[in-house]
Image (spheres, rainbow, N blue to C red):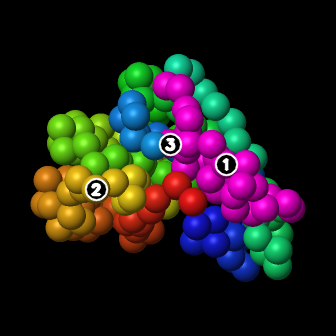
Amino acid sequence: MSGCLPFCSGDFDGSEGCDVLVVGMEGSGKTLLCRRLQGLHAPEPQASHFSAYTVTTSGIQMTEVPCPKGTPHVKSILMREVGGQMSPLWPQYLEDCRMVLFVVDASDAANVAPSAVELCELLGHPAMPQKPLCVVLTKQDQALLLSRQEIELVMQLSALERSVDHGCFSVLEVSAIP
């Protein structure tokens, strides 16, 4: 996944930093996503040592993710995960980030609409318009899962994509479980 980040491409010189802001509702899978990304690109593969056990992030958790070999200009990405309980403070971290990952639990129907509200509030912040945004639909390995079409309908992702001025908007479906 780190290959899809804009600063892992040749047009980024690394001078603006490599922070990615990772936000989403409590229990959406932010911690596990960061941990999995870190393990995927570690010098020693960590799949056999991977643990899906997490606790709720209360505060900020920093995870350094090595970029894949051959990535120009950037050796690692700093994932700054801000807990779901801290949603009123998310905008404070926009200035220092290069991109925003907004994580949504695709298996939790009750939290999709609140996630949409939080995402709209974040998009309305003055520092957000120039930031690339990736909505990450996690927990794709779960048996009971909302379809992408259902999530797009509830969250109005097509309308949100049109509202992003710079056009840097994407949606990814992932499972952090190996």
Q: Are marks 2 and 1 in contact (CB under 8 Å)?
A: no
| Residue neighbourhood size for the residue with mark 2, other residues' Cα within 10 Å, grouped as few (<14), some (14–19), many (≥20) | few
Distance between mark 2 and mark 1 Cα atoms? 21 Å
Q: Residue at x 50, y 51 (%)?
A: 100
| Residue neighbourhood size for the residue with mark 3, other residues' Cα within 10 Å, grouped as few (<14), some (14–19), many (≥20) | many
Q: Residue at x 40, y 54 (%)?
A: 138
Labels 2, 3: front one: 2
Based on the displayed image, in which of its 4 quarters is residue 137 positioned?
bottom left
Q: Earlier in the sequence, mark 2 or mark 1?
A: 1
Task: Give coordinates of residue 116: x percent, y percent.
Answer: 24, 45
Mark 2 lies on residue: 143
Q: Earlier in the sequence, mark 1 or mark 3?
A: 3
> Which mark identifies residue 70?
none
Residue range of the region highlighted in magenta in the rendering? 30-57
SS at badge 2: loop
> Which mark identifies residue 50?
1
Based on the displayed image, in which of its 4 quarters is residue 85 positioned?
top left
Left or right, 125 with respect to 149, comes to right
The answer to whether residue 56 shows anywhere in this view is yes
Q: Residue at x 63, y 65 (%)?
A: 2
Q: Nearer the viewer, residue 41 or 158?
A: 41
Report the amino acid beneath label 1.
Phe
| Residue neighbourhood size for the residue with mark 1, other residues' Cα within 10 Å, grouped as few (<14), some (14–19), many (≥20) | some
Report the amino acid beneath label 2.
Ala
Q: Quadrant of the C terminus?
A: bottom right
> Which mark identifies residue 30?
3
Report the amino acid beneath label 3.
Lys
Q: Earlier in the sequence, mark 2 or mark 3?
A: 3
